[in-house]
Image (tube, rainbow, N blue to C red):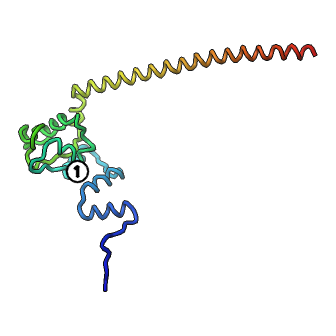
Amino acid sequence: MDCKPIATIYKNKVDFEEELLRFGDDRAMVERLAADSELKFDNDEERFRYNLQHAAQSGVGTTFNNMLRTAPLEDEVTMSQKKQYRQWLLQMFDDVKDVDIPLKGPVKPGIRFPIPCGSQWRAILENDPQAVSQRLMDAADTKSTDEALLSVRIMELTIGAAKLEEAEVMLVRTLTPMQNKMARR
C-alpha cells in the first residue's frame, strides 16, 4: 500500500515560496522578487510593462480605496497619494475615463491597477502642491533640527570648557600646597 503524505513539510521558506509560485500565487512571487531585489529594469517602459502584467484587477463592487489596499499596490501607493494615482491612471490609459474610477463608490470591473512608475508619476508627485508643501515643511524641520543640534553641541562645548577651567583651577589648588610641601623638604 503506497501512502502519500497529506501535507508537505518544507525545509525552509524558499521551498515553500517555490511551491506557492508553482500554484500561481502572484503575491508570493511579487514578495519574493521584491525581497530578493531581482527586479532589474533598463528603463521605465520595461518596469511599466512588468507592473501592468502583475497589476491588481478590479472586480464587481470594488472601490478605489479597496484597490489601493490590495497587493501589490498596498505597499506602493499611500492613501494620501490616491488622487495623484488616479490622475496617473487617467493619463496613462486612454480607455479609462473619470467615471470608470470614482474616488467614492465602485470602480468599473476589469480595470487593471499597476504600481505607478515612470517620469509621469514622478512629475505628478513633484508638482503636487501638497507634496511640495510637505517637502518644504520637511526641509524646515530638518533645518530646525540641525540648528537645535548645533545649539546643544555649543552648550556641551561651553559647559565642557567651563568644567575644564574649573578642573584646572582645582588641580592648581591641589598642586600648589603639594608643591609648597615639597619645596620645604
Q: Residue furthest right?
A: 185
Residue 11 appears left or right of 73: right
Between 161 and 93, the residue placed more toward the observer is 161
Residue at 68% over, 15% down: 166
Estimate the x, y position of residue 183 in percent, counting from the top left. 90, 14
Vertical side of 125 occupied by 175: above or below: above
Mark 1: which secondary structure? helix
Estimate the x, y position of residue 134 in percent, counting from the top left. 28, 26
Residue 156's quadrant in the figure? Answer: top right
Instruction: Give the residue type that dot 1 points to.
Output: Tyr
Residue at 36% over, 52% down: 36
Residue at 35% over, 64% down: 15
Between 21 and 178, the residue placed more toward the observer is 178
Residue 95's quadrant in the figure? Answer: top left
* Number of marks drawn: 1
Q: Residue furthest bottom?
A: 1
Estimate the x, y position of residue 185 in percent, counting from the top left. 93, 16
Residue at 24% over, 59% down: 25
Residue 146 appears left or right of 80: right
Q: Which residue is mark 1?
A: 50
Residue 2 appears left or right of 156: left
Is the N terminus in the top left, top right, bottom left or bottom right quadrant?
bottom left
Residue 16's quadrant in the figure? Answer: bottom left
Between 81 and 2, the residue placed more toward the observer is 2
Badge 1: few (under 14), some or many (20 or more) residues near its Cα, within 10 Å?
A: some
Vertical side of 86 occupied by 49: above or below: below
